[in-house]
Structures are given as structure tokens and as C-alpha cells.
Image (tube, helix red, strand yellow):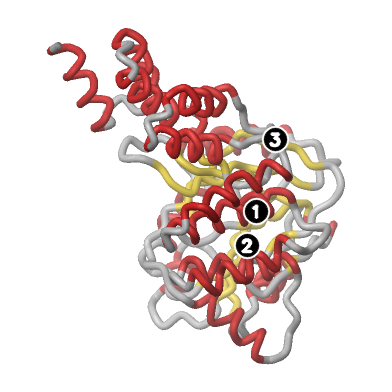
Amino acid sequence: MEISLCMIVKDESSVIERCLNSVIEVVDEIIIVDTGSCDDTVEKAKALGAIVYDFKWINDFSRARNFSFSKATKDYILWLDADDILNEQDICKFKFLKENLDINVDSVTMNYILSTDENGKYLTSLKRNRLVKRTNNFKWIGSVHEYLEIYGNIINSDINIIHKKEKEYSNRNLLIFEELISNGKALSARDLFYYANELFDNNRYDEAIKEYKKFLSMKGTWIEDVLLACSKLADCYNYKNDIENENKYILESFKHDMPRPEFCCRLGYKFLQEDKLEPAIYWYETAINLVPKENNLSIINHDTYTYLPWIQLCVCYFKKGNIEKAYMCNEMAAKYKPNDKYVRHNREYFNNN
């Protein structure tokens, strides 16, 4: 089995070599589609054996990605962004996968690590369909925040792809959405959700609230997007200091699915702020007892399952005067973040008193 790596790039000179060198041992063909670089991205890619194609940028990520897929010639396609890497451990896992993959598999998911702490511990992640059978001709959909439409025999792997973002945040995606709207394009439910996210990320909270509410009124939307919209609405109202509506949308999430740890921790924090310790403890303990769904493709905030509720339970039990339980909770938090400043501060206090 052979693999084509397909990427779309623009002005990625600072990271392209790092990315390609991290996967060069497991791919048999490198397809780079350049959308208008002004630096030496293309030269660096070619020096590492890439086949480079030019593609005129037309404010449509799917078209660029589909063009890159059309140039692949190997059995499977791996897609990456230029600021992604695989570490040595995951390259070993990838080699094993490559040697043993059943040819009847249509897609393999891999963990996409969005952020890490100072010790390299994974903080947020999600699963994405990363390795797909070329002959299935899977297509990318969506001008912005594009997704790969996958069907068939899908298996999950424990391979991690780490996103090491270098570029500063820009309003590029928001501008693309605004151009689509000005041209009269009706946004799909998914597009509307991501448009609201872009408004939120650009601190346009009143507009974001309007679009999130419009999204929540739609039928047939993905439950994970619905829950994240509830969370973002709560954030919007928090920034507007509208506590009543913030609470409303935290609780709104419970109408759609089982409690998620993010919302449990938010409720725990609100009760802790009010010195209502028993309900605070209840919600933090609920968060700890939850586990991520195995086949969930949504973003997972690992701290809300582990470190965060434990460190907050330490505070709760300390306030209740149960120092032994508070100490134990701090030590549980330390298992996940041993060098955390709050863990160290608490430990020093307990050891000296």
C-alpha cells in the first residue's frame, strides 16, 4: 500500500520543511498545491521531493483541496496542513498501520491535537478522517471550514497529528463568509454555525448571538455543533455580563444531550462563586465521572474531564474545612498537571500547615 500526501499551502516557508520532514518516511508521493506564495515555500517543498501545482486562489478551500486530491496517484491519500507534524512515536504507529491496513478500509481517523500545555500534554483534540482511499473520490465540501464527505468502512487509529500553529489569527475566514453573503449565497446550517464562530472570534458578540440562535432554530443539525453553539452563546452573554442568559444557554445544552463536562464545570464554577459548595461538588464530580465518546468527532477539552474538576474540588473541600479531602483532590489534579502553578501552590500550603 502506498500513500500520497496532499496539501494546500500559501507562504508557509517557516513551517513547510518541519511538516514534510516529519512524515517523509511514511508517504510515497508529496502533492503540494500552492495558492499564491510570495516566499520560498515552493522551493523548499520541491527540495524535499514534492510535486508542486499552482492553483489560483478563489476564496474556496474545498476547490483547492479537491484539486490537490485529483493529482494523487497512490492507493491512499493523507492530508495535512503545513503547520501540522507527527512525532516519532506516531510515525512508528503510522508505519505499522501502513504495513497492516486492510485494503477494504475506506478511511482512517487520527487524533488532531489542537493545543498542548507547557509539558506537551494534550489539552484539546478531535478525531478527523485523515487517510482515505483514493479510488473512492471523496470530495471536500464548503468554501470555509471545509469538511471531507466520507462513507464506507471507517476505522479509528490512535495516531496523533499535532497542530503547531505559527501564524497569528486573521479575519480571512470572516471576510470570505461576508463575501459569500454579499453575493447572495444562502448559508447552509453548517456554514451559519461557522460564520457565527468567526463573528465570535472577532469579538462581534451581538451579531454572533443572532447567528447562533438562527442556527439553533434549524432542523437536522449535528448535535456536537448544537452543543458548541450553546457554549458559545453562554460565552457571548458572559462577555456582555448578562448572567441570566449565560446560565440559560448552559442549561439549554441539557435539552439536546447528556451533560458534557464543559457544562458541568461551568455550573460547578457558578455554584462555587456563590459559596454553594454541595451543588458545586456535585457538578465537578459529575464531570470527572464522564468519559469521551469513543467515535466522537467533536473537539474534546481534556482538562474538563480531569485536571479542572479535581483542582476545583480541592477548593470546594478546603472551603468546607475538609483538608484531607482537599489534599487528595489536589494530588489527583497533579496526576494530570504535575507542574501546574496552582497544584504546586496548594501542595506547598498543605505541607506547611
Report whether 36 appears left or right of 275. right
| Number of residues whose C-alpha sits closer than 10 Å to that of mark 1, classed few (under 14), some (14–19) or many (20 or more) | many
| Number of residues whose C-alpha sits closer than 10 Å to that of mark 3, classed few (under 14), some (14–19) or many (20 or more) | few
Depth check: give the residue in front, 203 or 316.
316
Q: Which mark is drawn over residue 6?
A: 2
Quarter of the rendering containing residue 155 = top right
Is residue 68 visible in the rendered structure shown here?
Answer: no
Marks 2 and 1, how far apart at CA: 6 Å
| Number of residues whose C-alpha sits closer than 10 Å to that of mark 2, classed few (under 14), some (14–19) or many (20 or more) | many
Give the total number of marks visible in the rendering: 3
SS for dot 1:
strand
Q: Give the amino acid at mark 1.
A: Leu
Report whether 44 appears left or right of 232. left
Q: Give the amino acid at mark 2.
A: Cys
Q: Residue at x 51, y 37 (%)?
A: 267
Depth check: give the residue in front, 269 or 345.
269
* Residue 341: % across, % down: 24, 32
Q: Earlier in the sequence, mark 2 or mark 3?
A: 2
Marks 1 and 3, how far apart at CA: 34 Å
Q: Is residue 24 above or below residue 353?
A: below
Q: Residue at x 63, y 62 (%)?
A: 6
To which residue does mark 3 refer? 258
Q: Label 3 near label 2: C-beta < 8 Å? A: no
Marks 2 and 3, how far apart at CA: 38 Å
Report whether 244 appears left or right of 218. left
